[in-house]
């Protein structure tokens, strides 16, 4: 029982390190925020593997959550930090969708572009209704969030490369 308790004790939320804060803030700046709106409530779940989950935990919930013996998640999942840096979550996409255009950089797709994006395929040209360069929230023609992508332009051709899309959830079996 002692070994099991020690293993479970690593599933605790903790404050982010300065490096982790910089990774999240760098992403938020890239999509249009001047200041990290989640700075005061960021917490990290680090079970000791290759990636760490980053959450926003409102101040009012902190005391209640801190009393729990085990943390799997709490609050809004902002994303994960791994070998490739910060990867925003689909939860964050849904949270930020109402801010599309100001301050959040967004890419809007046509109905055909939506389908391509949700199959994790690059989207080109006429399938892109509105485009911005760099990391952005990707939304469908109805404004619903589809995930995160990167807007590129090569020789005048607009391209959206998926970073994480709603189809990912279904493809991975989750």
Image (tube, rainbow, N blue to C red):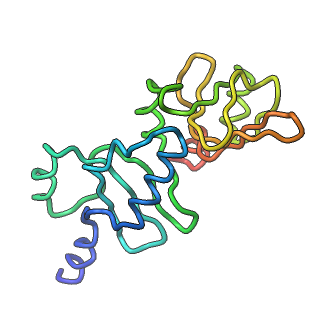
Q: Is residue 102 above or below residue 53?
A: above
Residue at the right extreme of this rendering: 155
Residue at the bottom extreme of this rendering: 3
Left/right placement of residue 100 relative to residue 153 reads left
Instruction: Locate the N terminus and report the quarter of the image it occupies.
Output: bottom left
Q: Residue at point 32% right, 45% down?
A: 38
**Residue 172 horizontal/vertical position (percent):** 58, 50
Q: Foreground: 120 or 153? A: 153
Residue at the front extreme of this rendering: 34
**Residue 126 horizontal/vertical position (percent):** 81, 23
**Residue 96 horizontal/vertical position (percent):** 44, 32
Left/right placement of residue 125 relative to residue 68 reads right
Q: Residue at point 77% right, 37% down?
A: 159
Left/right placement of residue 2 relative to residue 106 reads left
Left/right placement of residue 65 relative to residue 73 reads left
**Residue 40 horizontal/vertical position (percent):** 25, 49
Which quadrant holds residue 105? Answer: top right
Q: Is residue 4 above or below residue 83?
A: below
Q: Foreground: 80 or 47? A: 80
Q: Is residue 112 above or below residue 32?
A: above
Q: Residue at point 43% right, 52% down?
A: 25
Q: Is residue 93 above or below residue 27?
A: above
């Amino acid at each position: 029982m002692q070994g099991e308790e020690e293993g479970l004790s690593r599933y605790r939320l903790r404050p982010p390190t300065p490096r982790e804060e910089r990774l999240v803030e760098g992403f938020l700046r890239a999509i249009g925020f001047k200041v990290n709106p989640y700075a005061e409530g960021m917490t990290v779940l680090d079970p000791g593997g290759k990636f760490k989950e980053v959450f926003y935990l409102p101040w009012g919930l902190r005391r209640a959550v801190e009393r729990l013996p085990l943390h799997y998640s709490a609050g809004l999942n902002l994303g994960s930090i791994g070998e490739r840096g910060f990867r925003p979550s689909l939860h964050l996409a849904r949270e930020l969708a109402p801010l599309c255009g100001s301050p959040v950089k967004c890419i809007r797709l046509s109905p055909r572009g939506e389908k391509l994006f949700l199959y994790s395929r690059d989207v080109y040209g006429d399938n892109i209704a509105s485009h911005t360069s760099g990391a952005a929230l990707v939304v469908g023609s109805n404004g619903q969030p589809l995930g995160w992508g990167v807007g590129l332009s090569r020789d005048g051709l607009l391209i959206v490369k998926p970073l994480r899309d709603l189809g990912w959830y279904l493809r991975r079996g989750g």
